Structure formats: C-alpha cells, structure tokens
Image (cartoon, rainbow, N blue to C red):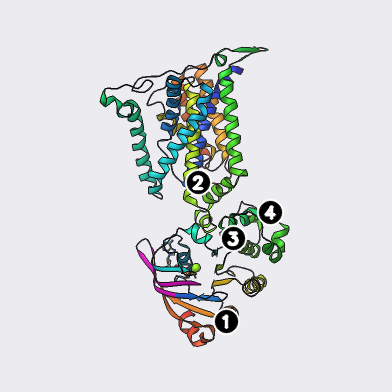
Amino acid sequence: MADVFFIGLSLSSILLLVALGLAITYGTMGVINMAHGELVMIGAYVTVLCQTHFGLHFLLCIPVAFVVTGAVGYAIERFVVRRLYGRLLDTLLATWALAIIIQQAIRLEFGAAFAGLHIDGLGPGLQNVPIPSFFRETFLVGDFVVQPYRTFIIVLTIGLFILTWWLIFHTSFGMQLRAVSRNRGIASCCGIDDKRINAWTFAYGSALAGAAGVMLAGFKTVSPSMGTPFVIDGFLVVVMGGVGSLFGTLGSAVILGEVQGWVASLLNDVLARAIVFGVIIVVIIIRPQGLFSRRGR
Amino acid sequence: MLELSQMNSYYGASHVLRDIDLSVRSGEIVSILGRNGVGKTTLLKSILGLDVRIRGAITLDGEDITARPTYLRARAGIGYVPQGRELIPDFSVRDNILMGCYARTDRRRLVPDLVRDMFPYLRDNLGRRAGLLSGGQQQQLAIARALASEPRILLLDEPTEGIQPNIVEQIEDTIQRLNKQVGLTIVLVEQNVKFARAASQHFCIIERGAIAASGVIDALTDDIVRRHMTV
Ligand SMILES: Nc1ncnc2c1ncn2[C@@H]1O[C@H](COP(=O)(O)OP(=O)(O)OP(=O)(O)O)[C@@H](O)[C@H]1O
Ligand SMILES: [Mg+2]
C-alpha cells in the first residue's frame, strides 16, 4: 500500500519538475516549448556523460545538469524563441524542429558519427546510469519498505519546488517575473527589462527539466527519444492544475502521478497511461479553468 | 526637455499619428487635447515605445532615445500613468509602488517619502490588494508607481477619467502640486478644457492623428475648442 503510494509520488515528482518549467515559461511568456522534453533528455545524457567520462558522482551530476540545461534553455530563448514572440504557432513549430535536431544530435554524437568516431554514452542506443549503492538498498521502518532512491527524488523535488516558490514570490527576480506575466507593457514602462526576464525564466524552467532528467536516468533507460512524452504530460499537468497557479501544478502532478502509480501496480503501465488521460479529459470538461484555479484565463 | 520631430506612429500597418512635432520645456505642463480616438494615447505610447512602431525622432534632454527599448526610456526618466491605470490588481499597494522602482537610477526599492506625503491613504494601506481600492485611490496608486521611479518627466493619460466628481479635484490638485512644488515636467492628456487651461502653459490639439492646433495656453480660445473638440 504505502510503497505504491510512494512510487506514485516519485512519478509525481518527475512530472512536477517538468511541468513547473512549462508552467512558468507559459505563464510568463505565453510560449510552449516543444523541446522541453528534450531538456529532460539532455539532463539524463549529462549524467551519462559525466559518469562515463569524468567519473562524476551521481549526486554531483544534478547541479551540473541543472547548469547545462539552464544554459541550453537560455540559448534556445535567445536564438529561437525571442525572434518569434507573439507567434504561438511559429514558436510551436520552431521548438518542435529544435526537439528533433537535439535528438538527432545525440544519435549522431554531435556529428562525430560522420567521421567514424564514437563518443561513449552517446549514439542511438540505450544507456544505463548506475545509481550509488546507498540508493539501492531498501530498508524497513516498521512495516514500511523505504526505497531510498524514490525518497531522494521526492525530497529533492520538494526542495526544488520550495526554491521555485521562493524565487517567484520572495525575490526581486520573481517580482519582475510576476509583473511581466501580468502586464508586460506596464512592467517595461516601470523599467523592467522584460526580455532579460524572459531569458532567465526560460533558463530556469529548462534547468528544472534537466534536474528531472538526472533523476529519471536513475530508474529508466536513457535514450534519445526518452523526453518526447514529457512535453505532453507536463503540459497536461499544467492545464489540469490551472494555468498560472504554482500550487495547482503541484496538486495536479501529485494526482496524476498517483493515478499512474496505482493503476500501473494494480493492472499495467499502458492502461495506467490511458486512465491518466481519461482523468485529464474529464477534469478539463468539468473545470476548463483547471482544478485549482479560481478564475479562467 | 522632450522633443518629438516629424514623428509618425503605426500599429502594424495602420498609420495613426502623422508628422507630430512637439516640444516640452523643463518644468512646464503641456496639455494634449482632442476628441476620442484621435491618437492621444498613441502619442504617449510612442514616447515610451510601447506597442507602436514609429518613424521620426524623439529626444530627451538632447539625447536621441528613438531606438531605445521601453525599459530604457523609463530608466532615462520618463514616468507613465496610463489610461485606465493598469495596476496589477492582485499585487499589494506596496508591490505596485515597488514595481516602479526598477526604473530608478539608484535601483533601490522603497516607497519614496514623496509618495508617503502625497498619498496618506496609500501610506496607511500598503498591504492592501490594489484591486480592492476605489477608482480615485487606484489613480493615486498609478501616480505613486510612476513617482517611485523618480522620473524627470511624467506622462499622464486622462487621470480623472471615470473618477467620482468629488475626487477629481483632489487628483487635479495632486497634478498641480507635482508640477509646482516638486518641479516635475508633465505631459497631460485631458478632456477637461477648464483644468487644462488652469494647469498648463502650453497645449496641443490632435485631430485625426495630426496636430490641429498648438501654442501657449492663452491661445486656446473657445473658438478653437469648439472647432476641434466638441463632438
Ligand atoms: N493596439 C492598437 N492596435 C491597433 N490600433 C489601435 C491600437 N490602439 C489604438 N488604436 C487605434 O488608434 C487610434 C487612436 O487611438 P488612441 O487610443 O490613441 O486614441 P485616444 O485619443 O487616446 O482616444 P481616447 O480619448 O478614447 O482615449 C484609434 O483609431 C484606435 O482604434
Ligand atoms: Mg486614450
């Protein structure tokens, strides 16, 4: 019982990190980044590469991936998204193309494959990331089987959620971000450099996806296409929770992760996904503004 | 202080303002008058570079700011109180004021003493949500937000529009104090000719996107008002 609940929560955690990034970029800039899942994938590959080439400890891969994917996100905003503001469809297409390019870059080992070279950890195949042994040994607390790795994912996610909340509601950056997302024109009339805020928001959202990628790498095989489902899943979490509501995103990630976890343990994974989508459809029909949002948008 | 020369403004393909020449001297109030929809708001937005595309030149204290993005114009000392106020309703009074501070040259974030002195209601209700304020209080807050950036020139767009008649006088008084006591240069978009006459030194009437009449305020005769402003 409790361990199924726990597995569900760890799925929720990954979903939450992915969705948070989408939620803040969509909320602030009105942009949907179709390459968001690829940032998760990049986070996972950063882990693979750091471990195979530099022997970096798994835990240290998290900050490294955070910074690398943040930088990639910053670049995506600077060179692609910024040029397409106010053109939602063009942005969708451009970032989707970018997603494919990123995947192919990993498959082709950034072009090294053409020269007949091979970089360990890249290429079209699957990669596995060993997690430290202390994460693998389950132990008992009373009747409850504690899975250290799942627990770690949940705790880290809670930490990152609190960090995000603090950043948005208690820092000067967050105030500018909220001002820009409410009224971009007036924010810039108040001296706020809205483009800079966009770029950093995008970078931060991407960094969260990268962190999710590291954690995902610890319990799933890593492959170039692993990120693809996450854009959809993440965005559904945002929509179900209510666009613009941080806690809405949290609530809906928990619900969907749990549904997935429970159905998967009682029946199977495929059915679990179907039921998750069913839940979302029902919620969106009954409450189009999202579960936790007071007003529509 | 502020100079527009041969300025043309466009929203996409629609050409809204034509060949505007306007010169605002330091320390004065210039009133922009005209019927609804002639382009008064567009004039202010052009000065800020907000939403519109312009041709021509805008200089502030001799510096060409035409190519600068909006936030840099704000930081150069242009304060803006938009039509309809455009506060952020779920921000507190304090946060709405602090928003203005991003345009300060010293980048400090505080509620300036000037705001506390001028608007005791705001001073005593800093924690209230802006959306809960009355129309007049919201107008005060919009002015306070602009003042928080310590601007050199203030653009006011119909500050008494949609405000209870008994509060209108208070707002008008505030505007005159800002000009006389604080020494702020003001560009004022107004519908009320009487107040424009009382407060400003120069006027400028816009009709269908072009300047129809302008000059010192004494030249604003009833005849001109009748010709360009009555509906
Ligand atoms: N964002 C916009 N996009 C396209 N056209 C616009 C936009 N804003 C205003 N216009 C058009 O530009 C013209 C001038 O509008 P503007 O708001 O500047 O008039 P105004 O003089 O301020 O009117 P009012 O007295 O009603 O405030 C109008 O014809 C209006 O329809
Ligand atoms: Mg107007």
Q: Chain of mark 4?
A: B
> In whole angstroms, how far apart are the C-alphas of marks 1 and 4?
36 Å
Whether label 1 lies within 8 Å of ligand 1 gets the answer no
Provide residue B221's location: percent of width, then percent of height: 51, 87
Residue for badge 4: B128
> In whole angstroms, how far apart are the C-alphas of marks 3 and 1?
28 Å
- Do marks 1 and 4 both belong to one polypeptide chain? yes
Identity, as a three-letter code, of the amino acid under mark 4: Arg
Residue B149's label in the rendered image is: 3
Q: Residues within 10 Å of mark 1 (few under 14, many from 20)?
A: some
Q: Chain of mark 2?
A: A
- Secondary element under disc 1, as helix, strand or loop, is helix
Q: Which residues are magenta?
A: B1-21
Residue for badge 1: B197
> In whole angstroms, how far apart are the C-alphas of marks 2 and 1?
43 Å
B3 is higher (above) or lower (below) than A9: below
Residue for badge 2: A28
